[in-house]
Image (cartoon, helix red, strand yellow):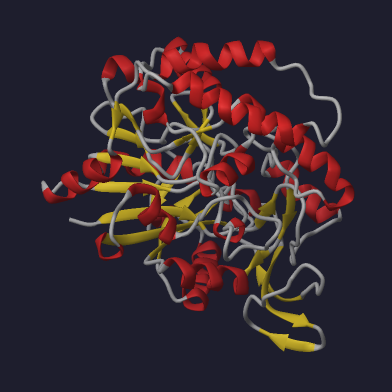
Amino acid sequence: MQVDVLLGLQWGDEGKGKIVDVLCPKYDLIARFQGGPNAGHTLEFDNKKFVLNTIPSGIFNKNTLNLIGNGVVIDPIILKKELDGLKEAKVDPIAEKNLVIARKAHLILPTHQLLDAASESKMGSAKIGSTLKGIGPTYMDKTGRNGLRVGDTTLSNFKEKYEKLKEKHLNILSHYGEIPDFEEKEAAFFEAIDFLRTIPHVDSEHLVNRYLDEGKKVLAEGAQGTLLDIDFGSYPFVTSSNTTTAGACTGLGIAPNRIGKVIGIFKAYCTRVGGGPFPTELDDEVGEKLRKLGHEFGATTGRSRRTGWVDIPALKYAIMLNGVTDLVIMKADVLDTFEEIKVCTKYNYDGEVIDYMPYDINSIKPEPIFETKEGWNADTTLIRKKEEVPEKLKTYIKYLEKTLGKPITYLSVGPDRKQTIKL
């Protein structure tokens, strides 16, 4: 057996959580492989809405085990709050025994968040647009080889390890000015650590490979999007982890030859949160219409998302990097009332017409070259079968398939899991 991977092909917020929720009955294990609680995976069904930050999106299927992998950074306070909220909604992963955490996953400390805020503030107008969850500083400690991991919480010297790392952080923070009081947050952190110990800790690399050896099906769930990858995204306006298929290997402990299908999720248009380049951005009434109709506000932060038309060079780049085998198009319903839809097919880049994503799109801004497509002008939110898909939408989908060179296997026409059509 091989691990299928599901990830985003744009700047995040593509709707990955919904598709994981739809597909999870086919899998024995859903494994989140990178990122932190800045992710907001929104799921809607039975007139209920849930936003998951750290927990994999297969958690509502009691027959599927959910793993928070070693590539994830965990804020124990946020995880506890997330699980408390699920319990109030009559969903209890601990009682159901369908949630486990990798021992090698790193912990976000209260001082990581202070460092995040201090660093972002110091950058002024050049700030990245961090969610201030402490994710970047946590990954820095991970690569600096002095982070704290979930497995450390069961050691007798955990408090000593914590104090040592805290002291390092306070020394750094002293250079930024006055250090905010975090005594209350620290108390909440240790309360959450006690809670964290009640969730089964596993060696995720052994768990995942054992599942595969036993012939069980595994789906790796990514967070953020390809264009935010630390290596291949729009650096420095990126996240702190590898959001691509390669991140599934390091974030779960699986070999590259154990990767199976790679399912790439993208919106019928495009959005971005925070700073950084966005070639097809629409800073006009059309962009505002997309924002309003698409309810484009961050599930975790509430921040308004920037909006623009779909970007073919960027999508081709993401498909190449990830080895995508299947595509899923999200939020097609947002374009239901548009007479015309524009698609960026090339860039005018420093006087040259190119059809690929160049190295530098920060200091040299690509000008999008658009093709105009006919809209379908029909309400798609009530369709449930591929036979009901409007002909003009089918034409748009076929155009994208031909242009991107990959099949579109699912179409999403609304936030509810029922509004997902297999093509």
Quadrant of res 362: bottom right
Q: At which x and y percent is residue 92?
A: 36, 16
Q: Is residue 55 above or below residue 314?
A: above
Q: At which x and y percent is residue 105?
A: 42, 37
Q: Is residue 85 visible?
A: no
**Quadrant where the C terminus is found in the figure:** bottom left
Q: Is residue 27 above or below residue 8?
A: above
For the image, the number of numbered tags is: 0
Who's the residue at 66% across and 57% down the image?
Answer: 270
Q: Nearer the viewer, residue 19 or 380?
A: 19
Q: Is residue 171 above or below residue 249?
A: above
Q: Nearer the viewer, residue 50 or 204?
A: 204
Q: Nearer the viewer, residue 190 or 135?
A: 190
Q: Is residue 210 visible?
A: yes
**Quadrant where the N terminus is found in the figure:** bottom left
Who's the residue at 29% across and 14% down the image?
Answer: 95
Who's the residue at 44% across and 31% down the image?
Answer: 55
Who's the residue at 53% across and 67% down the image?
Answer: 318
Q: At which x and y percent is residue 195?
A: 42, 14
Quadrant of res 375: bottom right
Q: Nearer the viewer, residue 311 or 226?
A: 226
Q: At which x and y percent is residue 140?
A: 59, 46
**Residue occupying the far left of the picture:** 214
